[in-house]
Image (cartoon, grey):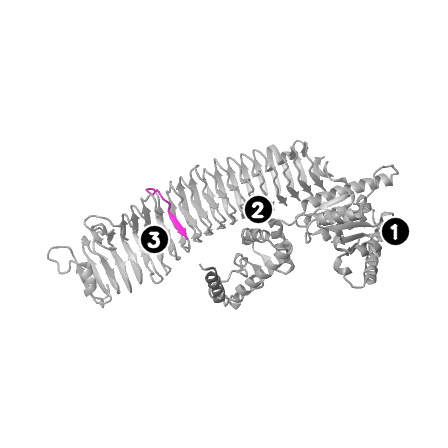
Amino acid sequence: MSSDKTSFKVSRKLFSKNRSIQKAIDEAPVGSTIEIEPGVYREDLVIDKYIELVGVGDREQIVIQGIKSSSITMKNGYAVIRNVTIKQPKELGFDKGMDTVYIENGTLLLESCKVISDKGPAISIDGETAEPIIRYCEIISTKNSAVLNKGTGNIIFERCHFASQSKENPVIHILDGNPQFKKCKIVGTESKSCGIYVEGKGKGRFEECNIYGFDHEAAIYIKQASPSFYRCKIHDGKHCGIVIRKGKGVFKKCSIFSFEKDAPAIRISDGSSPFFQESSIRNCKGGGIIFEEDSGGLIDKCDLFGFIYQPAIRIFEGANPMILHTKIHDGNVEGVVSTSNGKGALRDCELFSFNSNIISVTNGGQLDVLNCKVYKGNKHGIYYSQKTKGIVQDTQISQFSQAAAIHVSKAADPSFIQCQVFDSEKGVQVHEHGRGKFERCVFWDIEAEVWEVQDSDPAIYLCKEMNKENGSYQMSDSEYSDPLLISNPRVNELFEQVEKQIGQWKVKAKMKEVIHYLDYLQDRKRLGIKTMEELTIHGLFLGPSDTGKEKMADLYAQMLKEIGLVSEGHLVTVTPDQLANPDPFIMQQVLQQRIEEALGGVLYLDQIHLFTQELTSQTLLPGLQQIFNHLVPETAVIISGPEEQVRAWLETWPDLKKFFTHEYFFEEYSPEDMVSIFLQIAKEEDYQVHETCMSLLLKEMHQLWSQDDQKSCVERVREYFKMVQVVQSRRCAKLPKSQRTKEALTTIMPEDLTWKGEKDIQPGDKEWMQELEKYYIKKDESGE
């Protein structure tokens, strides 16, 4: 104890000079130390200056207990309290539910103390200027929270022990602020509620904490908040370890383990999007993570293993997480399940050693698997069934000795691209009207058959099989591979470009069907075989504008050239705008010139229902008749426009209908397609979209998609991208010079994806008062 401090002693002994701590505080000069001897001090302490209270002896015998208000109220200044027990206030033996320690202002260093409450919180922190430091304390509440935090100052808990026996209140309740908890224990062995509950404006930073023993509620519950956890252990409970609703949260280098079978270790729902990195989730009987209700989030560099009754990851109800660089292994059932319209993506992951299907996508699910390794299972490696989708690309699938490595059934339609399948009983099983596309896949060391196709029609392009002969592997074309594509690599390249177009899977399937059919008729003609069927190369592109019709027409033109049906393979587009001229003679000349330019290729007539009747009858129809009657070099004609208007136009000119037997139905882009359009635009503009954006980006696209206006989905996405550019540039302008790297200035982050719409005027905007005035004028006029 420094010599310049004044020291007081307080004792409950009968003839002591100071028997009241509050009196000693009031009389002591600023900076004094008050030594408190064993005894029970029933008084309400209010501290508003620099003072130190130090218990002398066994802290269990040094008890401070309030009467009418909190036992300790910290109002101002700086104070230290060490080595005492602080109990909840009671008046005439009755507990009124007051806080045991209430900190509203100033810095209170509470060290090596025991704080006990009954009906009220043990420690309550409020206000902007409360900045306590609480270390080496045991903080317990019987019927309420150990800590209730509303303070927004710099709040620190270090090496404390928290517990509660409450049925309703969490052990730690954070409503606001960002308190820090370092190397603390949050114990739920006697609690009927959750451990840490963070809501609203609350955050909280937990480092190296041990959170365990919660059997009735989650150890951590996050609602509309975003706390962070670093190097924490969350374990041993009969309920969930973590529940997140409408929230975010960061979990880095955490260990989540030993939860029972009644609930998953982690449940993420209601649009939440947390971030888990370098964390392990293990030995949880009820499974690892559930994503549901449009939630998302990012799992990166994590390790998930040891699941008995439920899968490691389950994805439901529109949830769309991203799982990167993660190991998922050693479970009694499935590894990853996407069902009930669940979505998501696995990239650069390793999945192995499960007793059921390692990846299972059912009931409308959509899961992408990119550059992964899937191996060593007792059932299928990857299973798609019940009208599901997904892209599996650059993935190894191996060591499935009891079933096919890949199973597709019941209208499932996934794409497997450049995958390697080996060391398994069977390669691919496509049953019960399964679909799917298999492109450039390689198979070897397959015990039975590579392909088992029953009542199904998969598309198989350029797949290879390696068979061991004379000690070495020999490569051969797979049995079901597409002969057209094998014989003509350029057609294969063009089909690859078709597949890369966004959305429009029905058009892609139809175009493949038509090209195959035309190639077949062309072969019959070449071999001199008579046929009654007319070789028709013309088509109708029906549907809304701005849905990729012109690009598809261009690829169609090139394919027609490759199979020898047209000589040039170029596309000439004619639109009403090109013919907009008040002089009819000039319009006719322009149209005639465009028709002549198209000869030998494809003439693409866009929005034909807007062409004038005079122009159609005098110029267009004669030009088309020459094409249809083969009086000019072979040329394909495509009519494009909204289905209803195009059909009405054809009814006006019924002699043309018979030439257009191939119809392609283009649909408006889906929200998922709009995400792809956004990524494409970003790439064109030299931006990159951070992988943590995907869930939020999909939600934004759903909002754009549901807008009721006359703009196309592409127009909406382009306008949205411009807004995102503005938000991103404003954020980057605030960065210090040292942080303005090329990557930082060209990366779109989640915070860039939301913007304030025109009508969303906020306080502080110039238009705010004007909008208020308009609002009140309307109210006055309506008499409200």
Q: Which residue is mark 2?
A: 345
Q: On the image, numbered disc 3 is attached to which residue?
A: 148
Which marked residue is nearer to the observer: mark 1 or mark 2? 1
The amino acid on which the numbered mark 2 sits, given as a three-letter code, is Ala
Kindly report which numbered mark, 1 or 3, lies closer to the viewer in this rendering.
Answer: 1
Of helix, strand and loop, which one carries label 3? Answer: strand
Q: Give the amino acid at mark 3.
A: Leu
Q: Residue furthest left?
A: 15
Mark 3 closeness class: few <14, some 14–19, many ≥20 residues within 10 Å: many
First of labels 1, 3 by sequence position: 3
Q: Under tag 2, what secondary structure?
A: strand
Among the 4 quarters of the image, the one containing residue 426: top right
Q: CA distance from mark 1 to mark 2?
A: 51 Å
Mark with earlier residue (1, 2): 2
Find out whether residue 409 is within the magenta segment.
no
Residue 232 position, x and y percent, is: 41, 49
Q: CA distance from mark 3 to mark 2?
A: 39 Å
Q: Which residue corresponds to the image point at 31% horizontal and 60% vertical from the top-left? A: 104
User: Circle 1 sits in a helix, a strand or a loop, which is it?
Assistant: loop
